[in-house]
């Protein structure tokens, strides 16, 4: 683990976390309902942020695990690091933040997170941290705008009446006639759907809740069987990734 063990994890306010995420996360965007931010500090400076909060589609997500209380789970919805931190820092920081949640918020029984293969990867870090894979699906929810920006469908669905700059100040609903019509939006802005997969992972803080999972656990081998292995938006198998990692060492 090397110097990763020297990283200090502290709760930080959104006014510190959000600018860092905008600067270092591949999306350049924050999740507005993130409510718990951890900072990763090394040598006295902030070099990483992990943000947790309720899922945007909380009513749907809560049903994945039977008997979950309304405040019984969180989503790890943003994780951003600069290039200063040593190897294995991401998995170390995830483990540390989960231990803090277990201690300070015992009502939280599990953590959910999503790996975006269109822009980032297929969740190597989650697998290293003992998350359970619970879904692999083709992702048609990320649009590349003509100016190079990217926007996720959920951003529009959660704020359908907010003016959008790429729509000249019009809202999503104004373009779609008050419907959740993603295809109409993509056509209107002249965007392109980015190909790839989205993978859903769950970490069970309370092992008893793993027994309550209402969907099947998916073996990691299924990622390659579906051709869903991704790294920085490029298709790659787990074997190729392991070989590259071994070569780098």
Image (cartoon, helix red, strand yellow):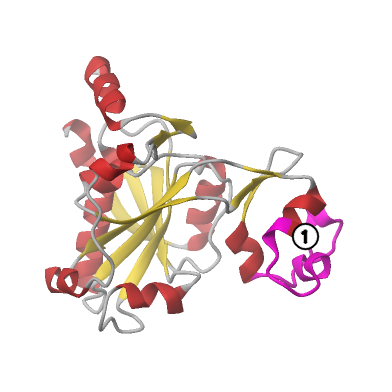
Verify whether residue 163 appears in magenta: yes
Residues in magenta, as a range? 159-183
Which residue is at 78% across, 51% downward?
A: 187
Which residue is at 25% across, 20% downward?
A: 243
- Indicate the quadrant where residue 86 lies: top left
Is any atom of residue 42 visible in this view? no
Q: Secondary structure at mark 1?
A: loop
Looking at the image, which is closer to me, 62 or 168? 62
Q: Main secondary structure of the magenta part?
A: loop
Compared to residue 141, the image places residue 162 above or below, namely below
Q: Say left or right for 74 vs 102.
A: right
Which residue is at 46% across, 46% downward?
A: 197
Looking at the image, which is closer to me, 48 or 106? 106
Which residue is at 25% across, 63% downward?
A: 216
Is any atom of residue 196 visible in this view? yes
Q: Say left or right for 240 vs 14.
A: left
**Where's residue 214, x and y in %?**
27, 72
What residue is shown with label 1? 164
Are there few (<14), some (14-19), or many (20+) residues within 10 Å of tag 1? Answer: some
Looking at the image, which is closer to me, 142 or 223? 223
Compared to residue 188, the image places residue 163 above or below, namely below
**Where's residue 34, x and y in %?**
47, 65
**Where's residue 101, x and y in %?**
25, 67
Residue found farthest to the left: 208
Verify whether residue 42 appears in magenta: no
């Amino acid at each position: 683990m090397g110097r990763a063990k020297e990283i200090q994890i502290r709760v930080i306010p959104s006014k510190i976390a959000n600018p860092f995420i905008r600067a270092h996360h591949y999306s350049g965007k924050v999740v507005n309902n993130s409510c718990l931010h951890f900072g990763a500090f090394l040598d006295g400076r902030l070099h990483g942020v992990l943000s947790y909060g309720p899922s945007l589609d909380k009513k749907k997500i809560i049903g994945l695990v039977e008997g979950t209380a309304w405040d019984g789970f969180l989503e790890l919805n943003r994780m951003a690091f600069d290039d200063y931190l040593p190897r294995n820092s991401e998995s170390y920081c995830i483990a540390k933040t989960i231990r803090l949640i277990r201690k300070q918020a015992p009502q939280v029984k599990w953590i959910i997170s999503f790996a975006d293969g269109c822009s980032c990867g297929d969740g190597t870090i989650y697998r290293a941290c003992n998350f359970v894979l619970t879904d692999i699906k083709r992702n048609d929810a990320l649009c590349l705008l003509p100016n190079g920006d990217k926007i996720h469908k959920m951003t529009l669905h959660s704020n359908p009446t907010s003016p959008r700059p790429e729509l000249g100040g019009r809202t999503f609903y104004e373009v779609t006639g008050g419907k959740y019509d993603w295809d109409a939006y993509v056509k209107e802005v002249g965007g392109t759907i980015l190909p790839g997969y989205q993978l859903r992972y769950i970490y069970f803080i309370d092992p008893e809740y793993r027994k309550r999972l209402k969907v099947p656990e998916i073996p990691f081998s299924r990622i390659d069987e579906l051709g869903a292995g991704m790294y920085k938006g490029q298709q790659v198998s787990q074997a190729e990734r392991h070989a590259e990692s071994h070569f780098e060492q």
